[in-house]
Image (tube, rainbow, N blue to C red):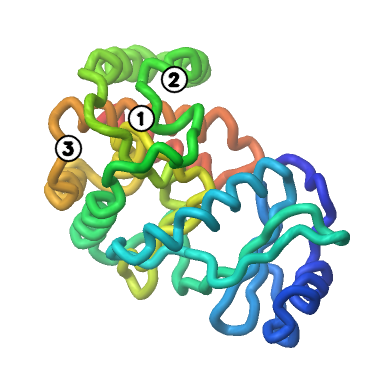
C-alpha cells in the first residue's frame, strides 16, 4: 500500500469540520479505514468523512463530487453521493467529502442470502447506470477501453499462474479478444466494480460504493463483476436483468473478468481480501 502523501487523522477531520462545517464538528468521529486512497471516518450515526491521503485519490474523489449527485437519483440502489463538500485550506491541500453512511458489509465478506435475487438486483443496477455519458465524463486509461488494450497485462499475468490453468486461460483470452468491439456510445461505468465495492445488508445487496474510478466506455468492463460473485446460472439471471448484453458484450465481459482476476492475483501480496476475489473470479472464468 502506498504511503500517505499528507498526514491524515481523526484530529485533522475534526479541525476541518470545525473550520468549514461547524454544525457537524461536535459529532463523534471514529476511524473506519486508513486505506490505499482515503482515510474514512464515521461521523455520528448517519455520515462518513472521506479524506484523500494521496494526490491521485483527491482527483478521483473530485470525480465523485462532480458526477454522483447527478447520477444518484436514477439508480435503483443507494450510492455515496456527497452531502457536503470540503475545500482545500492552509492545513490540508485537497477537497474532501461528507457522504451518507450506507449500512451493510462488503459482499466480499458477507455474501447475499439469495444469490439469484442479488444477481437480478445488480444486473438491474448496471442497466440503469449504463446510459450514454456526456463528453465531459472522466477518462480512465485502464477501464472501459477496448479489450485489446489490456493484452500486455494479461500475458504478464498468465505467466504467473499455474501451468495447468495457463492454456485454458489463454484460450479464454483469445476468444474474448476476438469478440467484436463495442460500437455503441460510451456509457457511464462504475469503473472499479467488484465485491469489495458492493454492500450487503440483511442478506440483500443494499448499495454500491467507491465511484472514484467512474468513467465511460464499454459496458463489458463493469459486467465482469458477474464472474466475481455468481455461478453460471446466476450469471444468466444477472444478464437477463441487465437486458442489453449481446453475445459480443458478454464475451468481452468474460475477458474483463480474466483481466481483473489476474490484476487481483498478481498485486495482492499484502491484501488477502482482494486475492480471494481474484481467485474466485479466475476459477469462474475458467469454468
Cα–Cα gap, marks 3 and 2: 21 Å
> Pointer 1 and pointer 2: residues touching (CB < 8 Å)?
yes
Front residue of 55 and 205: 55
Instruction: Pinpoint residue 207: horizontal percent, then vertical percent.
Output: 39, 64
Quadrant (top left, top right, bottom left, bottom right) of the C terminus: top left
Front residue of 181 and 37: 181
- Residue 55, by quadrant, is top right
Left or right, residue 7 beside residue 241: right
Mark 2: few/some/many CA within 10 Å (<14, 14-19, 20+): some
For disc 3, the marked residue is: 245
For disc 2, the marked residue is: 150
* Residue at 31% over, 40% down: 187
Q: Which of disc 2 and disc 3 is earlier in sequence?
A: 2
Q: How many marks?
A: 3
Is residue 260 visible in the rendered image? The answer is yes
Residue 23 versus residue 127 in the image, above or below: below
Q: Which of disc 3 and disc 1 is earlier in sequence?
A: 3
The kind of secondary structure element at disc 1 is helix
Tell me, for residue 3, which label it has, or none.
none
Mark 1: few/some/many CA within 10 Å (<14, 14-19, 20+): many
Cα–Cα gap, marks 1 and 2: 9 Å
Amino acid at each position: 500500500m502506498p504511503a500517505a502523501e499528507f498526514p491524515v487523522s481523526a484530529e485533522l477531520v475534526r479541525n476541518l469540520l470545525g473550520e468549514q462545517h461547524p454544525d457537524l464538528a461536535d459529532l463523534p468521529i471514529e476511524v473506519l479505514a486508513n486505506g490505499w486512497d482515503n482515510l474514512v471516518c464515521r461521523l455520528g450515526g448517519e455520515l462518513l468523512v472521506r479524506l484523500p491521503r494521496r494526490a491521485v485519490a483527491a482527483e478521483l474523489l473530485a470525480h465523485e463530487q462532480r458526477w454522483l449527485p447527478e447520477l444518484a437519483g436514477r439508480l435503483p440502489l443507494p450510492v455515496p453521493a456527497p452531502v457536503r463538500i470540503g475545500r482545500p485550506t492552509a492545513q490540508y491541500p485537497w477537497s474532501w467529502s461528507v457522504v451518507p453512511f450506507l449500512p451493510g458489509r462488503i459482499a466480499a465478506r458477507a455474501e447475499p442470502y439469495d444469490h439469484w435475487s442479488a444477481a437480478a438486483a445488480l444486473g438491474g443496477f448496471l442497466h440503469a447506470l449504463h446510459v450514454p455519458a456526456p463528453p465531459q465524463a472522466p477518462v480512465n486509461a485502464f477501464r472501459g477501453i477496448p479489450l485489446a488494450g489490456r493484452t500486455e497485462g494479461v500475458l504478464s499475468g498468465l505467466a504467473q499462474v499455474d501451468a495447468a490453468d495457463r492454456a485454458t486461460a489463454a484460450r479464454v483470452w483469445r476468444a474474448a479478444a476476438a469478440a467484436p468491439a463495442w460500437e455503441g456510445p460510451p456509457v457511464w461505468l462504475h469503473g472499479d466494480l467488484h465485491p469489495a465495492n458492493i454492500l450487503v445488508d440483511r442478506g440483500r445487496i443494499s448499495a454500491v460504493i467507491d465511484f472514484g474510478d467512474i468513467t465511460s466506455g464499454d459496458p463489458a468492463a463493469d459486467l465482469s463483476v458477474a464472474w466475481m460473485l455468481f455461478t453460471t446460472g446466476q450469471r444468466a439471471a444477472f444478464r437477463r436483468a441487465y437486458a442489453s448484453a449481446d453475445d459480443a458484450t458478454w464475451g468481452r465481459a468474460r475477458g474483463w473478468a480474466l483481466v481483473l482476476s489476474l490484476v487481483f492475483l498478481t498485486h495482492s501480496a499484502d491484501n488477502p481480501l482482494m486475492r480471494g476475489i481474484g481467485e474466485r473470479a479466475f476459477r469462474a472464468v475458467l469454468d
